[in-house]
């Protein structure tokens, strides 16, 4: 398998360093899957809609699906956009692609034409898997459009009802009795230094960029995060966040629990009462949620009506969780500890340790999971800041990327010559050695854990015929953390209301979660000394 063009490799000296340290084991996710299925064959791996699936049955489904996909002519290094909900078919397809060395692009079910078409073009994907519908959205027209626009896209896989001519039923493939045989399915052709999957950035410019995560670095990512989250063989993880996200997939996520022979309980609902019912019914031990959902959960009036005695750990990630919410959650569920995660799909993971004093856990986002995570906090001139002072996070390590996929100009700005990633996050070091997040330099709006590029939305709003200029800013929200406010300067004699703006934006094909939820009509913007919109000043004006 030749190196994939557009991927920035780890330098040879670092490859050797990480191998010698035992971080990289030179095995693939396909080989990892075979290992766990052989080791835990009789145990339950997945529970979905109260139906258990054993490791043995999961293995049979993956082998069956991989054999069918192999007939399509897919080969190691091909790309495949995955846009599936939290269902067993997601897990089967993910591992079937890994068995073949095909690289999944981890799209969200909430993505629409703008995002999916971008992922397909940039990755040059040969396949696209999607559900027949999500809520009231039917995927048929979207799939037809992107198929017509992308000559390399050969295979459309539909989960659920298939009414699309030329598409293939994923359900039917899984029901096929064909067996997988031959060396093409043993992982021997897959290089563990090559990408296992593409995660998505919350990038500040345009739609998300593709993050290549290699087999070596991703398996270490899983192993290192699992080591600090107290996973036991009989534990159960409730996965309610979209499983394509790095957090529920691998931090430690689905992969971390399967690594330990534990089970994964799947849910497509995030309603508090649904989550509480599943915790009680399935004796869930671990939850991975964003702060928005934790706030809703602990404020659910029916909380006391459920038996939550099995729940030991709530991992919080995606955005900063206020200390008072951590304290409240632990008071409401006395046998439970809230463990915060500061992480990024690009790599670095910081966890509050379960053994940390409560005051430290409440105040900080933890510390890196690897002794070889190299962290720098630098000022605007690139100088290290003293402990306790705020600096921008630069990071390099055994599971942090060395470059986004096929964006060399952006990579030249986002990475230092010696391989440190300029994260844009502002942090300071706590006396305990843990870190505290103090904001960010990059122009992102963090809505309930979803990172939205302000520039992407601004560029779309600027195409509206009534708009002269626009600045999208975050405004505080007690539940979501931040919401998008579109500050608009109109052209002469024009008018625009928020409902019409949102309808216009939906027509461009963007995901609904990116829509502005507030609009302010303005005559001018405050400017910095460099003539740019001073968004920090604008935020204060709007608040």
Image: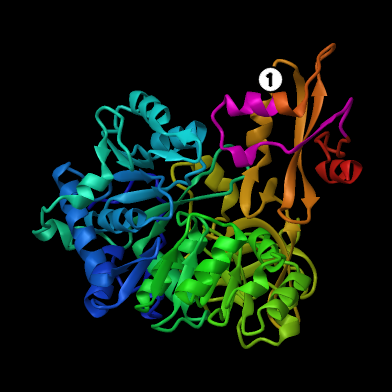
Is 458 displayed left or right of 421 in the figure? right
What residue occupies the far left of the structure in this picture? 182
Q: Quadrant of residue 50?
A: bottom left
Residue at image x 76%, y 41%?
473
Task: Answer with the quarter of the image where residue 263 lies.
Answer: bottom left
Residue 73 point in image, percent of width and height: 16, 42
Q: Which residues are magenta?
A: 501-525
**Residue appearing at x 60%, y 47% in the figure:** 413
Scheme of colours in the image: rainbow
Residue bearing mark 1: 464
- Up the image or down, 436 lies above or below 185; here it is below
Residue 487: x, y in percent?
A: 80, 33
Q: Is residue 205 visible?
A: no
Q: How many marks?
A: 1
Q: Residue furthest front?
A: 305
Residue at position x 63%, y 62% from top? 394
Q: Is residue 413 above or below residue 401?
A: above
Residue located at (81% from left, 17% from top) = 495
Query: Residue placed farthest to the top in the image?
Result: 493
Please determine whether, in this image, residue 183 is positioned above or below residue 340: above
Q: Secondary structure at mark 1?
A: loop
Query: Where residue 423 sits in the image (x, y, percent)?
Result: 62, 57
Q: Is residue 371 magenta?
A: no
Q: Nearer the viewer, residue 169 or 125?
A: 169
Closest to the observer, 123 or 375: 123
Position above or below: 286 against 245: below
């Amino acid at each position: 398998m030749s190196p994939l063009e557009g991927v920035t490799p780890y330098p040879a000296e670092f490859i050797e360093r990480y191998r010698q340290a035992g971080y990289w084991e030179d095995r693939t996710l396909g080989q990892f899957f075979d290992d766990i299925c052989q080791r835990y064959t009789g145990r339950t791996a997945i529970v979905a809609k109260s139906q258990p699936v054993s490791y043995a049955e999961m293995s049979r489904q993956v082998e069956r699906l991989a054999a069918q996909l192999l007939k399509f002519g897919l080969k190691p290094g091909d790309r495949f956009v995955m846009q599936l909900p939290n269902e067993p078919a997601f897990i089967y397809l993910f591992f079937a692609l890994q068995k073949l060395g095909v690289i999944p692009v981890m799209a969200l079910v909430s993505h629409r034409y703008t995002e999916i078409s971008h992922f397909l073009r940039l990755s040059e994907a040969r396949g696209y898997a999607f559900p027949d519908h999500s809520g009231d959205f039917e995927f048929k027209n979207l799939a037809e459009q992107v198929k017509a626009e992308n000559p390399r896209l050969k295979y459309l896989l539909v989960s659920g009802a298939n009414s699309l001519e030329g598409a293939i039923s994923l359900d039917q493939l899984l029901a096929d009795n064909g067996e997988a045989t031959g060396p093409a399915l043993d992982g021997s052709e897959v290089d563990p230094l090559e990408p296992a999957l593409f995660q998505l950035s919350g990038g500040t410019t345009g739609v998300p960029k593709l993050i290549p995560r290699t087999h070596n670095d991703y398996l270490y990512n899983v192993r290192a995060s699992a080591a600090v989250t107290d996973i036991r063989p009989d534990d159960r993880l409730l996965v309610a966040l979209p499983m394509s996200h790095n957090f529920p997939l691998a931090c430690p996520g689905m992969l971390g629990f399967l690594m330990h022979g534990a089970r994964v309980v799947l849910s497509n609902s995030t309603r508090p009462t649904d989550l509480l019912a599943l915790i009680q019914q399935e004796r869930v031990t671990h939850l991975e949620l964003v702060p928005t959902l934790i706030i809703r959960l602990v404020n659910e009036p029916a909380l006391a009506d459920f038996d939550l005695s099995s729940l030991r750990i709530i991992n919080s990630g995606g955005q900063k969780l206020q200390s008072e919410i951590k304290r409240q959650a632990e008071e409401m569920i006395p046998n439970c500890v809230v463990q915060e995660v500061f992480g990024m799909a690009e790599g670095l993971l910081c966890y509050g340790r379960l053994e940390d004093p409560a005051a430290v856990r409440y105040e900080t986002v933890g510390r890196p999971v690897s002794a070889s995570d190299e962290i720098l906090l630098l000022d605007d001139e690139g100088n290290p800041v003293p402990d306790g002072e705020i600096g921008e996070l630069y990071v390099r390590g055994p599971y942090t990327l060395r470059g986004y996929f096929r964006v060399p100009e952006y990579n030249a700005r986002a990475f230092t010559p010696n391989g440190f990633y300029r994260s844009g996050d502002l942090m300071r070091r706590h006396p305990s050695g843990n870190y505290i997040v103090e904001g960010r330099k990059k122009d992102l709006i963090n809505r309930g854990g979803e990172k939205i590029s302000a520039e992407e939305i601004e560029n779309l709003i600027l195409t509206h015929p009534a708009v002269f200029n626009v600045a999208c800013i975050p405004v505080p929200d007690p539940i979501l953390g931040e919401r998008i406010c579109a500050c608009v300067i109109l052209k002469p004699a024009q008018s625009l209301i928020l409902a019409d703006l949102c309808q216009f934006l939906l027509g461009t094909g963007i995901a609904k979660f990116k829509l502005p939820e507030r609009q302010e009509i303005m005559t001018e913007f405050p400017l910095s000394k460099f003539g740019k919109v001073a968004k920090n000043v604008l935020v204060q004006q709007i608040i």
